[in-house]
Amino acid sequence: MDFRKTFDTIPEQFDKWRPRYCEELYSEIITRTDLGTHKSALEIGPGTGQATEPFLKTGCDYLAIELGENFAEYMQNKFGTYDNFHIVNDDFETHNFGDRKFDLIYSAATIQWIPENIGFPKIFDLLKPGGILAMFMTYSDYKSGNEALYEQMEEVYRKHFYVETKYTCRLDYEHALNYGFTDLNYQEWNKERFLSADEYVEYLAGTQVEHITLKEPYKTRFYEGIREAVRNAGNQIKIIDTIALYLTKKPDSDAVSL
């Protein structure tokens, strides 16, 4: 199964429940790239644009490439009033960008869908010398703030969570250094969220790729079990989010030092 367009089937639900990033992350990227009207940016797989507007507001020449037809339409409706907004509905892996080059290329929890031996070389080629690659995502910890509840939810998973295809997209972001990038820098920020039982079920159903593909009778049994577990734990689950940012750059010159 190709999971890449799974979220595209539920754009409104995805947009509502997808965790947002923090202002500190945007500030770090924009400052590092000196992003403004004189610079260009490419966003890979923007989805519904949770990480789009801060970059648009700099006035940069912004281009998004989005595989999902519904997501691309959603983005156009959301940001089409910006004169510097442009979007292409196509597959980054195969799209021909012509002679375009960018000062910033960034991915908000998308680049892991692209095989590294395709993604990193193509991004390297699309960047101007000295250009920046920013990769960021949210890692969510459901266990630390809910030890007893977590064990009860794990039991629900063991009993009712049956998916036909496992999600296996993984990427070691530090592998960018194997493809010519340099000066890799990592930063992180932490946030907390509190969701009720109903909110947590909607969050799972709208943002977790395997959960979206659940079929009956497992789907109903699973979500009923999760809802009951959270309600029995005071109708609240605490989620600790780590917002992770990897910044790396293409060398200022294409020349290789020996």
Image (cartoon, helix red, strand yellow):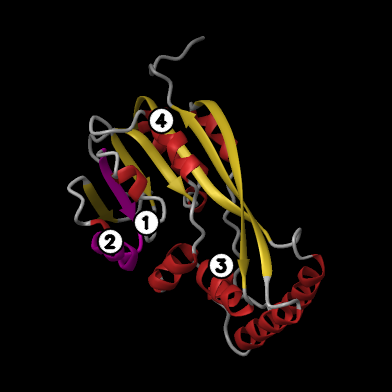
Whole-angstrom CA distance, mark 4 to mark 1, is 20 Å
Amino acid beneath label 1: Gly
- 66 or 240: which is nearer to us? 240
Secondary element type, mark 2: helix
Local crowd size for mark 3, using a 10 Å CA cut-off: few (<14), some (14–19), many (≥20): some
Q: Residue at x 57, y 44 (%)?
A: 244
Q: Does 102 sit above or below residue 216?
A: above
Residue farthest toward the top in the current orientation of the protein: 258
Identify the element where label 4 is drawn: helix
**Label placed on residue 31:** 4
Q: In the depicted view, which residue is nearer to us: 18 or 126?
A: 18
Amino acid bearing label 4: Thr
Span highlighted in magenta in the image: 60-77
Q: In x, y percent, where is residue 56?
A: 29, 45
Is 241 situated left or right of 80 in this image?
A: right
Q: Which of disc 1 and disc 4 is earlier in sequence?
A: 4
Question: Tag 2 or tag 1, which sits nearer the N-term?
Answer: 1
In this picture, residue 81 sits left or right of residue 45: left
Q: Are marks 1 and 2 in contact (CB under 8 Å)?
A: yes
Q: Which mark is residue 49?
A: 1
The answer to whether any part of residue 6 appears in the image is no
Q: Please state the horizontal and vertical placement of residue 255, each as a whole percent of the image.
A: 40, 14
Quarter of the image for residue 168 reads bottom right
Q: Earlier in the sequence, mark 2 or mark 4?
A: 4
The amino acid type of the residue labelled 2 equals: Lys
Label 1 to label 2: alpha-carbon separation: 8 Å
Q: Which residue lies under the disc numbered 3? A: 208
Label 3: element kind: loop
Can you tell which quarter of the image residue 34 is in?
top left
